[in-house]
Image (cartoon, grey):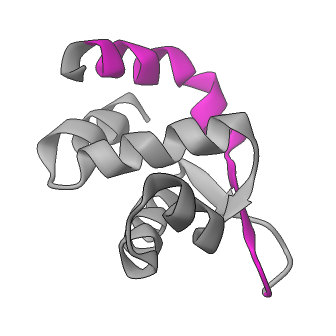
Amino acid sequence: MDKALWYLLTATRGGENRARLIRELSERPRNANQLADALDVRYKTVRHHLDMLEDHGVVEPGDNEYGKLYFLTDQFEQHREAFEEIMEHIE
């Protein structure tokens, strides 16, 4: 997971937006529309980043299809310190 976080946040375009998504989801679960509004980015952009984060085990969707909420995974929470360390390096 540490390597995936380094890749997602520093080695690709969009790392800043993915970090912002993680910060928003740290506060509470949200759906893609709420995240787009909170971050002032397009819905399609949020969906793209959520898909990447989901593919790497950082976020997971809830069960409801309509207004699907996204949550940080337990796996991510076990590696939160690595996330915070990465954030110190890029901020």
Tally the marks.
0
Q: Residue at x 44, y 36 (%)?
A: 1
Which SS type dominates the magenta stretch?
helix
- Horizontal and vertical percent for residue 67? 77, 79
Q: Quadrant of residue 31?
A: bottom right
Q: Which residues are magenta?
A: 66-88
User: x%, y% of residue 63?
Assistant: 85, 74
Which of 72 and 24 lies nearest the eye of the viewer? 24
Which image quarter: residue 30?
Answer: bottom right
> Residue 90, image x and y in percent?
21, 23
**Magenta run includes residue 37:** no
In the picture shown, does residue 62 fall above or below 6?
below
The residue under the point 28% across, 40% down is 9
Image side of residue 37 versus residue 60, left or right? left
User: In the rendered view, would you say 31 is above or below 86?
Assistant: below
Residue 34 x %, y %: 64, 64
Please tell me which residue lies in front, 81 or 18: 18
Magenta-colored stretch includes residue 84:
yes
